Image (cartoon, rainbow, N blue to C red):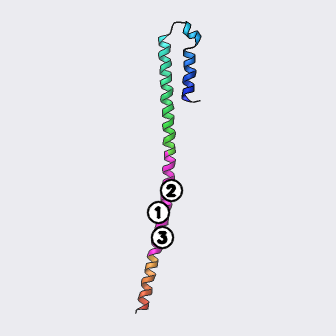
């Protein structure tokens, strides 16, 4: 259930017809308000924790991708150096 649904249920309980006929209990209403605030606080907290966990997964995946990219880049650089070395030796052998 979403927050609004919980709030609606809570308000129906707190302001039910039976409750309206009796005198309001300020202490109960204060506790009810604190419960709502606590529920919202923990709902937000859970959302932040879930968001943080999703971000950690994304960062981890990005690190893995970067590591693969860096590995491939190092292999390409090594092959380019080898190619340049072979070209240099070929040139030297042709013009000796």
Residue 30 drawn above or below residue 71:
above
Residue ID at (50%, 18%): 32
Give the crowd class for mark 1: few <14, some 14-19, many >=20 residues within 10 Å: few
Secondary structure character of the magenta stretch overall: helix
Label 3 – label 1 distance at C-alpha: 10 Å
* Magenta segment includes 28: no
User: Could you tell me residue 54's position as x and y percent?
Assistant: 51, 44
Label 3 – label 2 distance at C-alpha: 18 Å
The residue positioned farthest toward the bottom in the image shown: 96
| Residue matched to label 1 | 70
Mark 1 or mark 2, which has the lower sequence index? Answer: 2
* Magenta segment includes 68: yes
Q: Which mark is residue 84?
A: none
Q: Which mark is residue 76?
A: 3
Element at badge 3?
A: helix
| Residue matched to label 2 | 64
Relative to 1, is 43 on the left or the right? Answer: left
Mark 3 or mark 1, which has the lower sequence index? Answer: 1
User: Could you tell me residue 27's position as x and y percent?
Assistant: 47, 12
In terms of depth relative to the viewer, which is nearer, 26 or 2?
2
In terms of depth relative to the viewer, which is nearer, 10 or 53?
10
Q: Quadrant of the C terminus?
A: bottom left
Which residues lie in the magenta part? 55-80
Residue ID at (46%, 72%): 78
User: Could you tell me residue 19's position as x and y percent?
Assistant: 56, 10
Label 1 – label 2 distance at C-alpha: 10 Å
Residue ID at (50%, 14%): 28
């Amino acid at each position: 259930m979403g927050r609004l649904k919980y709030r609606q249920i809570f308000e129906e309980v707190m302001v039910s017809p039976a409750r309206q006929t009796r005198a309001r209990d300020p202490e109960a209403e204060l506790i009810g308000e604190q419960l709502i605030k606590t529920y919202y606080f923990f709902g937000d907290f859970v959302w932040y924790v879930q968001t943080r966990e999703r971000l950690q997964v994304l960062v981890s995946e990005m690190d893995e991708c970067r590591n693969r990219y860096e590995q491939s880049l190092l292999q390409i650089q090594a092959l380019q150096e080898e190619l340049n070395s072979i070209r240099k030796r070929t040139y030297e052998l042709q013009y000796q």
